Image: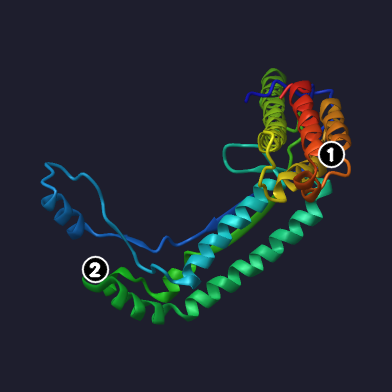
Amino acid sequence: METSTTVSQPTNNAPSIASSAMLVELNISLWTGRKFDKSVSQEIDTQKHTTTRAGNYHKKLFADEPKFEAINKFAGSARTAHYYQTMPWSDSGLRLLTTPLFFEYNKKMTEADAEFNRLVTEFVADYDNMIARAHTKLGNLFNPEDYPDISEVEAKFAFRLKYSPVPEVGDFRVDVGQDALKQLNESYANYYEEQLNNAYKDVWQRTYDALKSMSEKLAGDNKQIFRDTLVTNVTGIVELLDKFNVTNDDAMRKAKLKITDALKGITPDALRDDDYLRHDTKRKVDELLKEFAW
């Protein structure tokens, strides 16, 4: 699905979003706990009569260890929360965080940072015991040299969150002459507009995906089995539309109002129990899918 919505912002004379949004970057460093085993890889190639190295065998040093797996699982959920409340901005990993979402986002990330470090501390405390258990689990694959010193392992885990302002268009402060400065400002203005358009495309895509999924699950004459997220995924996105709308985009504002009106009073239980409501809700959702320039 390709969105055709564009933002008529920004130009050098247009209002900046610097006062209504900021940039944020989340970096979570993890230790994979995996080790390439050259001898086993060669052994498999020999057994399978390959003429070249057809694959690599990597050992899981802490297979089935809940404390190790919990760190990786939690990191994934923290990244999901980060992406959910922000919009894409640059290829380097910077994302756009609007001012209305800052306090809620910062609270969640602060809690996530604390929980991440708690999980790492628990893992580090049990590190030596896990190595002992790995000796039994891995059998002949066990090699004590695969396990770094505990201080080295602990340093591989990190939760870093950085905020930075959105640079203003025309904020170049370099002595390159007026012609060159004009070229730099125009270049950044184009970049600025492209990044904002991409951010909005992400919001439209998320909204479309949620509505499309809802329409598909409401299809058919028989009562569909679905989770509560069928509704909450859409209502959650709707709540974000206002907070993501840093340029007061009219299409986004209208979409929010129309989706809210279409789903007013709708609950998962009501959809499960009422055939007419289910069919009527699907009709309204399908109309929304056709109405906007997704």
Give me the C-alpha separation between circle 2 and circle 1. 57 Å
- Callout 1, which amino acid? Leu
Q: Image quarter for residue 197?
A: top right
Q: Earlier in the sequence, mark 2 or mark 1?
A: 2
- Callout 2, which amino acid? Leu
Q: Residue 43: give x, y in percent of width and height.
A: 14, 56
Q: Is residue 35 left or right of residue 269?
A: left
123 vs 168: above or below: below
Question: Which residue is disc 2 drawn over?
Answer: 141
Residue at (26% x, 55% y) in the render? 57
- How many numbered marks have been drawn onto this rendered protein structure? 2
Q: Residue 282: give x, y in percent of width and height.
A: 76, 32
Q: What sort of colour scheme is used for the picture?
A: rainbow
Q: Nearer the viewer, mark 2 or mark 1?
A: 1
Q: Residue 77: give x, y in percent of width and height.
A: 61, 56
Which residue reaches farthest top? Answer: 179
16 vs 60: above or below: above
Quarter that holds the N terminus: top right
Residue at (17% x, 53% y) in the render? 44
Q: Residue 151: give x, y in percent of width and height.
A: 44, 74
Quarter that holds the C terminus: top right
Question: Which residue is disc 1 drawn over?
Answer: 263
Could you say whether the residue bearing mark 2 is in a helix, strand or loop?
helix
Residue at (68% x, 50% y) in the render? 227
- Looking at this view, is 98 or 253 the one in front? 253
Question: Would you call the spot at circle 1 few (<14 residues within 10 Å), some (14-19), or many (20 or more)?
Answer: some
167 vs 163: above or below: above
Mark yes or no: residue 23 visible: no
83 vs 4: above or below: below
User: Would you say the residues marked 2 and 1 are in contact, meaning their CB atoms lie under 8 Å apart?
Assistant: no
Could you say whether the residue bearing mark 1 is in a helix, strand or loop?
loop
Q: Is residue 148 left or right of residue 162?
A: left
